[in-house]
């Protein structure tokens, strides 16, 4: 998968905090804990003046947007010959850049190839 999307982590986004494996136990979801965990990661990126990124599970894109990720820049399934194309759902890749502090936080996720 990585060769198909690694170009997204270049230029001003080459050095960034990438969020992995976020989960809140079902009994504790929707109480703000997920947001707090994302906030911690975004604060590390802000402190260092670098971008933050996340590869979203299906249906979690708006959660990340509510937490401050702004741009949906691609999908894990992108690229000609990507073996994940048509096999996985979700996989939107979102970024928050240092200059996003003043930007509108919630931006609609584009339809893409319909796998959101
Ligand atoms: C995704 C997950 C971490 C969210 O954690 P959480 O503690 O339930 O979320 P929070 O209570 O902090 O929610 C923060 C905000 O996002 C919203 N939100 C939460 N899940 C959402 C979803 N699936 N879609 C849209 N909005 C969502 C909440 O309503 C809340 O909105 P607010 O701005 O109005 O307050 C949790 O649902 C989870 O562990 N899911 C299973 C594992 C998973 O899919 N992880 C993601 C891997 S990429």
Image (tube, rainbow, N blue to C red):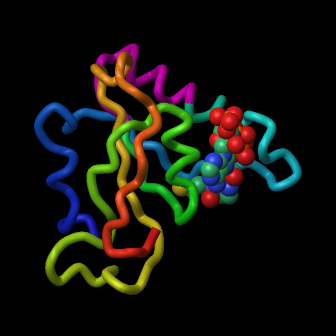
Q: Main secondary structure of the magenta part?
A: helix
Q: Quadrant of residue 45?
A: top left
Q: 15 left or right of 76?
A: left
Q: 100 left or right of 36?
A: left
Q: Residue placed at 74% from the left, 34% from the top? A: 32
Q: Quadrant of residue 113?
A: bottom left
- The number of discs equals 0
Up/down of 24 relative to 36, above or below: below
Q: Residue placed at 41% from the left, 54% from the top? A: 109
Q: Residue placed at 15% from the left, 53% from the top? A: 7
Q: Quadrant of residue 98?
A: top left
Residue 27 at x, y = what percent?
88, 51
Residue closest to the far left? 11
- Does the segment drawn in magenta span residue 96? no
Residue 104 at x, y = what percent?
40, 27
**Which quadrant does the N terminus fall into?**
bottom left
Residue 56 at x, y = what percent?
47, 56
Residue closest to the far right? 27
- Does the segment drawn in magenta span residue 40? yes
Q: 68 left or right of 26?
A: left
Q: 56 left or right of 52?
A: right
Up/down of 84 relative to 61, above or below: below
- 96 vs 24, nearest the viewer: 96
Residue 47 at x, y = what percent?
39, 14
Up/down of 37 relative to 30, above or below: above
Q: Which residues are magenta?
A: 39-52
Q: Residue placed at 53% from the left, 65% from the top? A: 58
Up/down of 102 relative to 15, above or below: above
- 86 vs 40, nearest the viewer: 86
């Amino acid at each position: 998968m990585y060769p198909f999307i690694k170009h997204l982590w270049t230029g001003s986004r080459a050095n960034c905090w990438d969020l992995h494996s976020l989960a809140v136990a079902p009994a504790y979801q929707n109480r703000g804990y997920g947001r707090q965990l994302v906030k911690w990661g975004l604060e590390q990126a802000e402190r260092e003046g670098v971008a933050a990124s996340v590869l979203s599970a299906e249906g979690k894109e708006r959660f990340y947007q509510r937490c401050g990720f702004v741009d949906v820049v691609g999908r894990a399934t992108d690229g000609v010959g990507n073996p994940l194309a048509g096999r996985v759902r979700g996989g939107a890749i979102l970024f928050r850049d240092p200059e996003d502090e003043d930007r509108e936080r919630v931006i609609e996720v584009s339809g893409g190839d319909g796998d959101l």
